Image (tube, rainbow, N blue to C red):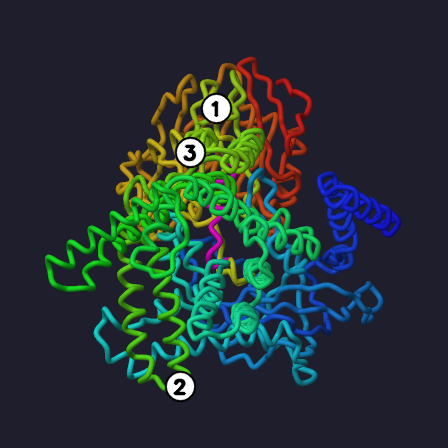
Amino acid sequence: MIATVLTLLTVLAIWSLCRSERPAWLPVAAIWLTLGLAAAEWQPSPASIALTPYTDGLSRHLTARIIRIHTLPPEAPTPDADQIPVWEATDSTPETENQPQAISADLALASIEQVTPDTSTEVPITGTIRATLYSATPIALRCGQPITATLRIKPLERYRDPGAWQYADYLATQGVVAHASAPASDIHATAPPIRTLPCLLADSQSWAAARLLAFTQSPQNRGLPELVRLSQQDAGMLNAMLFGDRTVLNHTLRLGFERTGSFHLFVVSGLHIALLAGAVFWLLRLIRTPRWLATLLTLAAATFYAALTGFGQPAQRSLAMVAVFLLARLLSRDRDGLNALGAAALALLLWDPSTLFDASLQMTILAVIAIAGLAHPIAQRTFLPWAAAARQAFRPRRRPLPPALAQLRLTLELFGEHLSAASHLKPIRYIPAQAFRLILWTLELALVGIVVELVMALPMAIFFHRAAVFALPANMLVLPVIAILAPAAVATFVASLINPWLAILPGTLTATLLHTLTSVISHISHLKSADVRIPPPSPWIAAAALAAWLTCCWAVRRSRAGTVITAAVLPLIAVAILWPEPPILTPNTLEITALDVGQGDSLLAVSPEGRTMLIDSAGPIGRHGQSEVLSTFDIGEQVVSPYLWSRRLRQLDIVVLTHAHTDHMGGLPAILQNFHPHELWVGIDPHSALYAALLAQAARLNIRVRHLHTGDHVQWGSIPIEVLSPSPTYLNPGPPKNDDSLVLHMQYGQSSALLEGDAERPSEAAMLAAKLIHPVTLLKVGHHGSNTSTIPAFLAATAPIDAAISSGRGNPFGHPRAEVIGRLAAQHTHLFRTDELGLTTFLLTPDGRIREVVNSTPLPVHSP
């Protein structure tokens, strides 16, 4: 069918071209659309269905081949968390301090053990899993190595919250559908490695990164003064910039570049490949290499460099665009950036249609549209002709110029001659023309920067929830420095391969530029207004902005009036993208939303007037080693914040920390930074470095910290809040405990909600003894449904209509416990579990009724 359609469209396109070129675009576009649909249909999908029955956590024997491997940075233990239970302290939860080395390995499965009550057989299977392996000694596994292993395969966790970043989707783009964790001793090589192209590319990337890191440890480099010495931290940044290896990239420095909107310039991207190709082609033409040979050598150098960086999608796109541009130049065709973008994008989409939804591709397309479609035409219609006139000053061969430009050239020459005569130095005469060109070059750079930042406001808001206020000055600083720093870093790397002494000179230049740049960016990023976090715009605003930009691309090429209109409209489009929209709220109800945050707690409360309160923000438990992203995964930044932004919230009124365990507190630093609440409510102050750091952060952000205890009453809009625990006499000088938890009671007319945190039996018994417990409409069950909480007397006294339990799927603690579920059932309470239902919203009305919304699906109203 597809072949028939393509044949008919091809015939129609040829017939149209023979008659007239104007109508031919329609069948040609239809051909590309059909090819794209066909490619999407033929594209293989990850074998997640085949592996699903085996992701039950049982220990299974399997055979596989390693198709990707890299060393993970050392992981520090997570303090203050609930301890891993004794029955789960197995080889799947290694102690980090006794396991100094960890690797991440992707395993392409060949067979797996199928277990039944009576038999155990090995069955063939396809699919890729990502395993994190630990060892106290160096791990000798290699990419391409066939292995046998005994692993517990588990499904990839998904957070069922709107806007949440999904690690499972990230892995799916790499073909990975499940994960496992085990000691390296459970992996056994069965044959020598099979050297495949992906393994060779990965090995070359790791080899290059290791060689640059080794130079920083050499005596020649370590003997230099600190300012001009490359450190291990510098090597991490250079490896990310040159080779795409972010293993040891410093998170603090990365955050500084992210806040200033310049991080994309400091990692392997299309810019670096374009800079390399431009430099190689210019050098080859400078030594009068024939154009065809210079083109081929440049493409070979760019391809080799793209392979050295791992040949990721950004490198593929840039290489395709460079190839289109250079080949068009060789064939004397129009070298338009939009044409190169279109050809490269169509080829990449035909090869992999799923990249249409890739943020990197979308940002690349918008950046090229901004530069080639808007900034360059605006410059061409305004000041760039002046630069052409200045370039011809004092040249023997000149092209004809319009009278005004010829007059400008003559003025620059006369001014230069006067300066030369006055100083008796002939070279002085070139200064006016060169200075004028420098001014125009700076103006062009500023124009490109302004237009790019105005256009990139949309993807920055959608994908990163940022309005980079200082992106323009930061990028104007970074871009020229990168143009010098990147070649200097390459020269350092190449020289270090020969002899460390040869790398000293380019290394000192690299270190000086790098340290200066990072220092300036660090100071800019710490300005209070440097990092503004915003919700994404509505889809209709994004569509309108895209249509407006395309219209501007057409208008700026039509006339000078179109250029003026475009220059005036572009800032208005950016303002429309960043303009605050009303939050998504349910008026005249008390809302309590239990977020799906795995094994942790996070609740959003919204008063009838629209005031907002976040209670806890989840976080990690125990010691983790599931994958390489967990060391940098921040549930507050990547799950809780996106949900709040999906509600179009820009600021919170109150943030509550029930107690200082990391599964309640881990995401709060990001929440405080992103939403700048007016107040932070806490209970007691336990001995915890993480808790102390949180209070220090609140002080830096001028957030008022309120300590609350039993008997305190706070009026939150129309909602009176009573604090039921901890008692003013309760003390805990040691590490955090569950009974440190703040317990809050909210009343709205005849409806009420009791939010327990992780309060356990002693706390519940104390509240009962003090006669503080009364029937409620909604109970947030204590300690994730553990049997240490929700004692029968407490549950009988609260008699809730609804109960919410926040717990993770496959919970290692066995939460929620069957005993607690049984008690709630006996009480005829409707139970809602985040591990089964995901995000759940409870809407309480003043007449005592409650309505639940599960994953955007409203349920029937329940009355008392």
Which sits in the foreground, 428 or 743? 428
Left or right of 585 on screen, residue 223: left
Q: Decide if residue 607 is in sight here.
A: yes
Magenta region: 630-644
Q: What percent of the width, then of the height, locates residue 211?
A: 43, 79
Q: Mark 3 points at which residue?
A: 567
Q: In which quarter of the image is residue 329?
A: bottom right
Q: Which circle's residue, 1 or 3, is located before the other in the chain?
A: 3
Left or right of 562 on screen, residue 235: left
Amino acid carrying label 1: it is Pro
Are circles 3 and 2 on residues that touch, CB within 8 Å? no
Q: Name the residue under label 1.
A: 582
Q: What percent of the width, then of the height, locates residue 56?
A: 71, 58
Q: Mark 2 points at which residue?
A: 498
Q: Which of pointers 1 and 3 indicates the residue nearer the eye? A: 3
Which sits in the foreground, 270 or 209? 270
Q: What percent of the width, then of the height, locates residue 53?
A: 76, 57
The overriding secondary structure of the stretch rendered in magenta is helix
Q: Which of pointers 1 and 2 indicates the residue nearer the eye? A: 2
Left or right of 599 on screen, residue 394: left
Amino acid carrying label 3: it is Ala
